[in-house]
Image (tube, grey):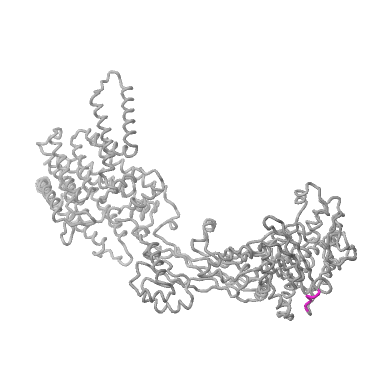
Amino acid sequence: MSVSGKSVLKRLDWFSVLIYISLVFIGWINIYSSTFTDDNPSIFNFSSLHGKQLFFIGTSAVSIIIILALEANFYERFSSLFYIVSVVLLLGLFVFGKTIAGATSWYDLGFFNLQPSEFAKVATALALAKYLSDIQTDIKRQKDQMIAILIILIPAFLIIPQPDPGSALVFFALIFVIFREGLPLYYLGIGFMVILIFILTLMFGTIWVSIILGLLLALFLLLKKPSFKVPIIPVALIYVAIVLFSLSVNFVFNSVFEQRHRDRFSLWLRLEKDPKKLEEIRRDIGYNTYQSEKAIESGGKYGKGFLEGTRTKGDFVPEQHTDYIFSTVGEEWGFVGTATVVILFTTLLLRLVYLSERQKNDFSRMYGYGVISILFVHYFINIGMVIGVLPTIGIPLPFFSYGGSGLLFFTALLFIFLKLDANRLNELT
Amino acid sequence: MRKILLSSIILLVGITFIGRLSYLQIFSFSPNQILEDPAIKAVYDYPERGYIYDRNGKLLVANQPAYDVMVIPREVKPLDTLEFCNLLGIDKERFISQLNKARVYSPRLPSVLVPQLSKEDYGRLQEKMRRFEGFYIQKRSLRYYDTNSGANVLGYISEVNEWDLERNPSYAAGELKGTTGIEKEYETILRGRKGVKHIQKDRFNRDIGPYKNGTLDTLPEQGKQITVTIDKILQEYGEKLMTGKHGGIVALEPASGEILALISGPTYDPALLVGRERSRNYSKLHYDTISKPTFDRSILASQSPGSPFKTINALVALQEGAITPETTIHCYNGFYVGKRKRGCHCGGGTRNLNSGIYLSCNAYFAGAFRKIYDQFPTSAEGMDVWEKHVKSFGLGTFLGYDLPTGRPGRIPNKEYYNRIYGDNRWSSSTIISNSIGQGEVEVTPIQLANMTAAIANRGHYFTPHVLKKIGGDPISIPEFTEAKHTTIDKRHFEPVVQGMAEVYKKGTAARLQIEGIEIAGKTGTVENFTRINGVRTQLTDNSVFVAFAPVDNPKIAIAVYIENGYFGSRYAGHIASLMIEKYLKGEITRVDLEKRMLEKTLEEEYAKPYSGQPFKINERVW
């Protein structure tokens, strides 16, 4: 069962690889543009950010070779170890962490700042797949459900106090994997309800939510078939629970949230009704989003052209080479560029779903879903934030945003799966 | 279901994103990118405003540099404040408060610390400037006046206001524009066109280079110089004569309609509205409600013309055949309207057209006026004909000269009297005052001068104008170069001109003869009233004079209107005579007369209505 390098390349899903390469390339072009200054035009200047990113791309290429060269079952076998190491690294941050921009999320390795939360994403995806694919594990059992969820929550809770709630949020996305493997759907239903009640309460207040919910319930009781027996007590309890939750939302929003969180929500849900004040909030609290929206808008259909983005050049959008890199695409390449990127991501994700589903090996499939969940949640939150449909949550756009750890571990995340996929026929023999 | 859940969410999110992006980039996209983009700043390069020259090529208005001391608060390093304040000529408190003000405005952007340094201060400061980091000197251009007169006709420039910005997209906030006079009328010529540079800015508003390598930039277009028809010497001389007198003088060249002088008294030095003291000076001028120096009486003061209007009535009567030059009318030291007697100063006796004019006989012109109306079955028809003739002299209209303000004056018509007296309940006797230029007729000095020019030309005039050349090329504007004909036949003018010439020989202005120049003129002594605490009160008569010279080949037509100057020959006649001599001879031979005119003022007269005491009018003061 030896896998020669040649056969890996032959069986590798080149379609995904091609999309990966396109995304990295487009990303780098835009990093180059957003960090470009007239006095520093050299592409291979490693002191500039785009030069550094080029170095990270090279490093990622090397890591791809290593990942593909290793035995496929290496990842499954050592997944628990990776997970433990990542948890230790996250814990270690509390002692040895380096603080950048207010978040203690890095280890200073001298030449390179390592962000263990990026590593933890890969490790957690592997560990979760490993646990769920274990023959002992039955996802229908509540105890096993809890352990699976715990695997996700441990790193998440270690990351929150860094503080980096954005990265922590990513781990919750792994719940998709558990769903795929049989976690009852009402978990998802409850989660969805919680978010819905949360938003509705903020927008309309507890009283209206209770009244409307009560009316809907009454309507249901009136219209139901007489033969259908309604379990009165549980329904009433659920109703009371919802009202209580709605009340607690107000409490959490007003007392637990900080002002900046409240502002983000009130901006996102347009809670401020006075258009003048809203505009003020947009420019003030929502400065990043306002600038990125305006930059994207100013690109029009075809954009202003490479290196011609006036707002990009003028550094109007903060963090443009990292979290807001998509706004450069919008300004310089227009709708054509942004739509292309969205389509590339959508295609890659759908392709990965297809690849996951064709796995014969449970571990590979579950890991595949882990990869999709992580990539998707990054892509969804990041672009959603940049184009102003989601509140500001700072996480990078995979393969795009400037950053060594990010690019390296997204690459590892993807290529470990592609390696597993390339190896799937070997599993049969 | 579980298998397609994630795929559906991925697809749904993709579609949502594409939808949002198409909303942003396709529907919200506005094509005015350059104007709205905060990253691109348009920096304007202003051309020099065009110079203004007088008819003989003498400079009237040019530009002068002014030096603003600017500060960028962020770049200020510790400095010797005391020395710097001494150099600037300000005290330390002011320096500190100005610096704080600038810092509040923006620490990164330049603010004016001390505006408009004099050349001397600038000279002293310049060599030491490099020692004070964060400060620099910015040059800007102000108007410079090479004359202390003509403020009303030249006009001034000031910063554009909100209204201008809304109406005219070529202005930007803080720019200067002509606000009155020639500066306003010929704004587009004088201004030129500003050039624009698009500068790429970063989010701190710092320059980071030209936008698109300057391909969208334009160069400034120089403002053109203009030559005006004003005679600088005559204008200055007239304003000197007007010292202490309220009124207007308008001098025209009858052969072209060119305005030689447009004088309003009292006036002010145009340099007052330039530079550091501008706003203080402006307030002072603006709030002087008694002498109203910013009110251009030469084109805005609409008043009764008095006797000079008799010439027009004579011409109308001749044209309509109501009289011939030989027609005589007897003056009983006045004339009767019904049973009421109206006075006359001519001395009484039988008058024909000639003596009627040179003695300014009220009775003669009242009679002639009646005769016009007697030609027609109704007064209304007579009125129509009279109005048509009178208006053909440019009276009762805005004339169409090239200055931004004006008044139409008033030539009453039948509708006017029908409104006052009821339909057809009036006759020539009711409106007889118009025969001698009192009553409802009102004219402005420029209309009076234009009327005189039409008589001088024996039947036509050219619309008065101040523009002579643009950038050295003589104008060819049909409105100004084509003659407007009156409705009076040329032959009727000669007897009237004769009468006006006699005014100087043996009539009301006999003592004002200039040796070697034959002048035709007409005096006017105009009753006028004001309201003091709501009571209609008569004031000393206005002194009016119109004249043109020489009689046979007129080079100048002039109207002088002096408020409360009493007899027409007194102030207005003297001034007209001096102006004509100055223009035609270039020097004054009658030094005594000139001295008297320069020294005499009417301030006492103007103070009377405001004194709160009863006062006498028409006193014989000399």
Residue B54 lies in quadrant: bottom right
Residue B94 at what x, y percent from top left? Answer: 42, 69
Residue B466 at what x, y percent from top left? Answer: 66, 68
Indicate whether residue B511 is drawn in magenta. yes
Which residue is nearer to you in this view: A198 or A17? Answer: A198
Determine the residue located farthest toward the front in the rendered image.
Answer: B613
Residue numbers of the magenta segment: B510-514
Q: Would residue B72 be found to the left or right of residue B275 on screen?
A: left
Q: Can see residue B85?
A: yes
What secondary structure predominates along the stretch shown in magenta?
helix
Indicate whether residue B44 is drawn in magenta. no
Q: Would residue B39 be found to the left or right of residue B293 on screen?
A: left
Count every numbered label the image shows and give the total: 0
Q: Can see residue A18?
A: no
Residue A294 vertical position relative to residue A199 in the rendered view, above or below = below
Q: What residue is rendered at 14% in x and 56% in y?
A: A96
Which residue is nearer to you in this view: A231 or B303? Answer: B303
Residue B239 at what x, y percent from top left? Answer: 66, 72
Look at the image and tell me in which quarter the N terminus of chain B lies.
top left
Look at the image and tell me in which quarter the C terminus of chain B lies.
bottom right
Residue A143 lies in quadrant: top left
Which residue is nearer to you in this view: A192 or A282? Answer: A282
Residue A147 at what x, y percent from top left? Answer: 13, 39
